[in-house]
Amino acid sequence: MSINDSLQTRDALAIVHGLTNLSEHAKRGATVIQSGKGVWVQDIHGRDYIEAMSGLWCIALGYGNERLADVAHRQMMELAYYPLTNHKSHPRVIELGFGLLALDQRQLTARPVLVGIFGMPLSSRKKRNLYRIS
């Protein structure tokens, strides 16, 4: 058993994959992706693939973006994460909010920006909040 087979075997035993037929997955195993650059990703066997879904909409700027990695590293060292609950905030999210407001070309009355981690599972509560703010 090679290290590559070992990764696939361990994946099948330990990881539940969303949007995956688990019976089929148990038979065929995962395609294990190990690296990426731009729109390309490479599996553990050296095969290249175009990543057409931006990592399920989370990698809009592509893989291996050095400028983004440098900024993320600096921010992770300063404050990796802090929730915006219970009247708490932090400088970067405030800068983001004002930057987004500045992009509003309509120049209407400034409205607060709802910042959150959104993706496919946008909850109905968050949707209602977005509609109330806009």
Image: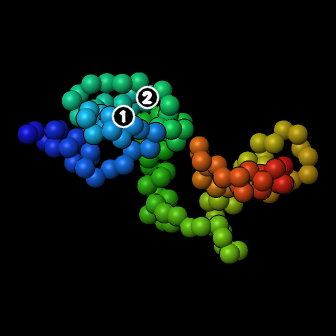
Question: What's the residue type where badge 2 is placed?
Answer: Glu
Which residue in the rendered view is the most extreme toward the front?
23
14, above or below 9, in the image: below
Which marked residue is nearer to the observer: mark 1 or mark 2?
Answer: 2
Residue 118, how many percent across, how many down? Answer: 61, 49
**Label pair 1/2, CB-CB below 8 angstroms:** yes
Other residues around mark 2 within 10 Å, as few (<14) / some (14–19) / many (≥20) = some
Residue at the spot of label 1: 36
Q: Number of marks in the image?
A: 2
Residue drawn at the location 77% of the way across and 56% of the way down: 129
Residue 60 in view, yes or no: yes
Q: At which x and y percent is residue 116? A: 64, 55
Left or right, residue 3 beside residue 132:
left
Q: Is mark 1 on a helix, strand or loop?
A: strand
User: In the image as oriented, which residue stretches furthest toward the left?
Assistant: 1
Please tell me which of labels 1 and 2 falls first in the chain: 1
Q: Quadrant of the N terminus?
A: top left
**Percent coordinates x, y for residue 34 in the rendering:** 29, 38
Amino acid carrying label 1: it is Gly
Please name the residue that numbered disc 2 is placed on: 51
Residues 15 and 39: in front is: 15
Marks 1 and 2, how far apart at CA? 9 Å
Asked if residue 84 lies left or right of residue 43, the reply is right
